[in-house]
Image (cartoon, grey):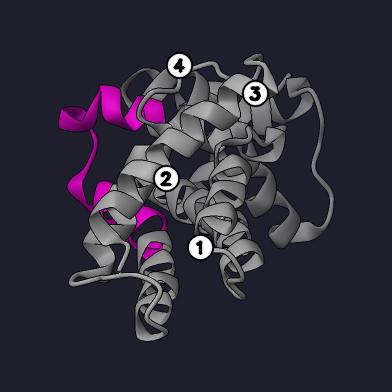
Amino acid sequence: MTRENTAKTRPRGGLTGKRQAILDGALTVFARDGFTRASIDAISAEAGVSTRTIYNHFTDKAGLFLAVIQESATRAADVQIAVIDRHLRKITDVEADLIEFGLDWVTPRPDSAAHFSLVRQINAEAGHIPQEAIDAWQQTGPRRVRRELGRHLRQMADRGLLRIDDPDRAALHLLLLISAELPAHHAALPTDELTKTVAAGIHTFLHGHLR
């Protein structure tokens, strides 16, 4: 009996469907096991395809990992940029709007959970992951998000609401300050405690950037 027959589910939709099944299965395995420990056999089982099918689409595990992190980072960044735009597109009260943004930013999102598990795996074994994959993740994910946040902060500065010399650095500081004091698993925190933590980070940010 082949791996194709023993896999838990056969993907449908031809080559495109199989490729997406591989990417989805690989994300699950890489997020769980990390790059080094993840095996093509485990990915084929999770994706419901044969190992031969995986190699028909991707040269090796490194190439598959690169594709996974690019797609996953792009999706996660799209969600985060939507949060930025939702709260900072039109500012009526700098402090209140930034706090609302911060609260939305730190709210865990189940559809992004696998991606951020993957990010934790990357941070844990960065020395064993191809640099190309790390660069791709940074470019399609964190750097893209910071550029978008920086653009909004620059617009606020242009309106005279903030004092910003380096938008990208200011964006990084803002993101660090609103999450620095939060525990790794903060979903269970009472709303008032979460609000106090985020508000403290915003107050610190405004202390350095408010006109």
- How far apart, in angstroms, are the residues tagged by discs 4 and 3? 15 Å
In this view, the residue in front, 11 or 160, is 160
Is residue 90 located in the magenta-colored stretch of the structure? Answer: no
- How far apart, in angstroms, are the residues tagged by discs 2 and 4? 17 Å
Q: Earlier in the sequence, mark 1 or mark 4?
A: 1
In this view, the residue in front, 209 or 13, is 209
**Quadrant in the picture for the N terminus:** top right
Report crowding for label 4: few under 14, some 14 to 19, many 20 or more residues within 10 A (C-alpha): few
Type of residue at label 2?
A: Ile
Write down the residue under mark 1.
Answer: 94
Q: Earlier in the sequence, mark 2 or mark 4?
A: 4
Q: Which mark is residue 183?
A: 4
Q: Which mark is residue 202?
A: 2
Q: Are marks 1 and 4 in contact (CB under 8 Å)?
A: no
Q: Are marks 1 and 2 in contact (CB under 8 Å)?
A: no
Residue 70 in the image, given as x and y percentages of width and height: 44, 55
Q: Earlier in the sequence, mark 1 or mark 2?
A: 1
In this view, the residue in front, 188 or 4, is 188
Write down the residue under mark 3.
Answer: 192
Magenta-drawn segment:
120-144
Type of residue at label 3?
A: Asp
> Is residue 70 visible to us here?
yes
**Quadrant in the picture for the C terminus:** bottom left
Residue 190 in the image, given as x and y percentages of width and height: 67, 16
